[in-house]
Structures are given as C-alpha cells and as structure tokens.
Image (cartoon, helix red, strand yellow):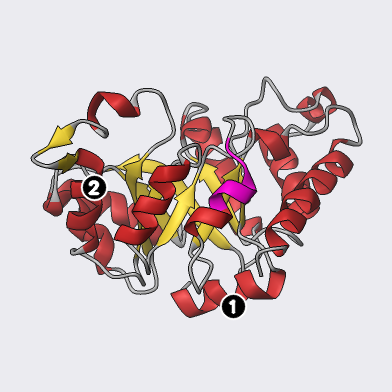
C-alpha cells in the first residue's frame, strides 16, 4: 500500500486507529478454545468487529511464532482475512546484517505479503536498507519507545543530543516519507512535539495508548501533520474489551470510541 492509498483511507474513515492482534490463547474467551484454530477464530471476530473503524492491523509475530508451525499458519490465515484496503503491519522487530535482512524482508513482504514490518536499527544502515528496496512497502523503524527500558540507550546523550534523535535523523536519510515510518511512544508529550518538528513529513506508529497510559488527544494534538501522519496502536484495550460469548460487541464499542475521539481532529 502506498502513501496516497493510506492517507485516503485515513481521511475517509476519519481514523488513525491501528488494532494490535497480540493474541494470547490464555486471554481469549473460553468458548473459542473449542474451535479448530482458536486464535484465528478470535482474530476473525476482532477484525469483523473493528474493520469499520480501523485503518491498520498490527500482528505481533511473537504471539504466533511461539505456537510453532500452527502459529505461523494462524498468522497467515489472519493476514489473508484482513480486508485489502486496510494497512497491515508485521510487528517482528527484525534487523541483522545485509544478507539476513534480505531474507527477513522477503519473509514479510513476499512470503507473507504485509504492507510493512517493524525493524530494529541498532546494526546500522546495511541492516535496514534491504527492507527499503520493495515498492509500496514500508519499513517501520524503532525510534523512541514507551517502555521503561528506553532510558537505557535511547535517551542517553550521543554527542550533543539524545541517541534517539540521532537515530531518527540518520534513518530518515536512508529512505523517504513514502516508505519509512518510525515507532514513537505515546506517553511523552514533549517528545512527541520534538519528534514531529524533527520529522514533519513522516508517519509515526504510536504504541502506548490505552493500557500503557497514553491517550488519543495527547498524541493527535502534538504529532498530527497535514496527512494525519499517525497510526495509533491499541492492542489490549480493544481486543480484550469483552470476556464472554458476546465479546465482539464490547470490542466493537471500544473501537468506535477510539475512532470518534480521532474523528475530532479531522
């Protein structure tokens, strides 16, 4: 999916909602455990309940890889079920030397045809560039994350600026606003403003809203640009909104609430 298509969908739906499919078999409604593929049955219901309000789905591959071959099959079935006009993210956080990154890129852009994949930039340019060679595919690079451990490296001074700023500026020079996004945590108001000033055109994938304490108003007020420029991810706060057999109804209501908050900014 190219930038024009993504932006058009965002403005049509008046939404920057990304639903995270971090599907944990220990947390899904008990009645689904009777299904042949419980995780897919859950994901299917979540997609049906939220597709009207969301512009992206983020599949956290760890929850599927942990289940072995069956998990990979569930992930593939889920990816195929997502409507073609909704942006897809493989949250895999890959990153390795060039020839290995080439294979990771083929995995998530060809074998499993996601629109984007998350990448860790620690090993430098040759670990990121292979992902940028695919037309109409996006590389989503870890920039400033919302976890406590971000202080260990990202916030440390590198020369005259925090390391995360050096990473953002350097990686931005490798790609374009049409194929590169950045993960920017939602719990840092001042830093959202700083990062938007630093990268006025790029899209940000923003975790940390909901269960981690971030909120839609803070993110949109401080980080939106003329094309919206945001995908705000909510995982647990939506997909586990309901517990019983009618769980999808609660999920639908919660997704609609987030979309209505976002619509105020369009």
- Answer yes or no: do the residues labelled 2 and 1 have beta carbons within 8 Å? no
**Mark 2 or 1, which is nearer the eye?**
2
Mark 2 / mark 1, whichever is N-terminal:
1
Image coordinates for residue 229, horizontal then vertical, percent: 48, 64
> What's the magenta bit mostly, secondary-structure-wise?
helix
**Residue furthest right in the image:** 246
Q: Residue at x 40, y 42 (%)?
A: 92
Task: Kindly identify which residue carries mark 2.
Answer: 165
Q: How far apart in space, not on screen, are marks 2 and 1 (Cα)?
A: 29 Å
Position of the C terminus, as image quadrant, is bottom right
- Decide if residue 241 is on the left or right side of residue 182: right
Left or right placement of residue 264 versus residue 122 in this view: right
Say which quarter of the image contains residue 13.
bottom right
Q: Is residue 214 shown left or right of residue 109? A: right
Q: Is residue 76 visible?
A: no
Q: Residue at the spot x=88%, y=43% of the render?
A: 249
Q: Residue at x 72, y 33 (%)?
A: 38
Please tell me which residue lies in front, 191 or 206: 191
x then y, percent, for residue 247? 85, 36
**Residue at image mark 1:** 8
Magenta segment: 214-219
């Amino acid at each position: 999916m190219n930038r024009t298509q993504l932006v058009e969908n965002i403005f049509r739906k008046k939404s920057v909602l990304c639903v995270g499919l971090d599907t944990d078999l220990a947390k899904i409604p008990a009645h689904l455990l009777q299904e042949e593929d419980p995780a897919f049955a859950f994901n299917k219901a979540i997609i049906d309940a939220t597709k009207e309000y969301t512009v992206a789905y983020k599949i956290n591959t760890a929850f599927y890889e942990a289940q072995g071959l069956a998990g990979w099959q569930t992930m593939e079935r889920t990816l195929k079920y997502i409507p073609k006009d909704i942006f897809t993210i493989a949250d895999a956080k890959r990153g390795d030397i060039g020839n290995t990154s080439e294979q990771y890129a083929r995995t998530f852009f060809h074998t499993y045809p996601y629109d984007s994949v998350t990448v860790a930039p620690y090993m430098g340019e040759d670990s990121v560039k292979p992902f940028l060679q695919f037309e109409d595919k996006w590389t989503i690079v870890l920039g400033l994350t919302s976890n406590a451990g971000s202080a260990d490296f990202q916030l440390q001074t590198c020369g005259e600026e925090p390391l995360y700023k050096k990473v953002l500026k350097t990686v931005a020079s490798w790609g374009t606003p049409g194929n590169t996004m950045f993960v920017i945590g939602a719990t840092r108001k001042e830093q959202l403003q700083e990062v938007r000033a630093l990268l006025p055109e790029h899209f940000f994938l923003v975790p940390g809203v909901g269960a981690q304490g971030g909120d839609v108003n803070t993110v949109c007020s401080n980080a939106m640009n003329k094309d919206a420029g945001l995908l705000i991810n909510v995982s647990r706060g939506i997909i586990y909104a309901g517990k019983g057999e009618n769980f999808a109804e609660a999920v639908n209501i919660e997704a609609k609430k987030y979309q209505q908050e976002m619509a105020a900014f369009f």
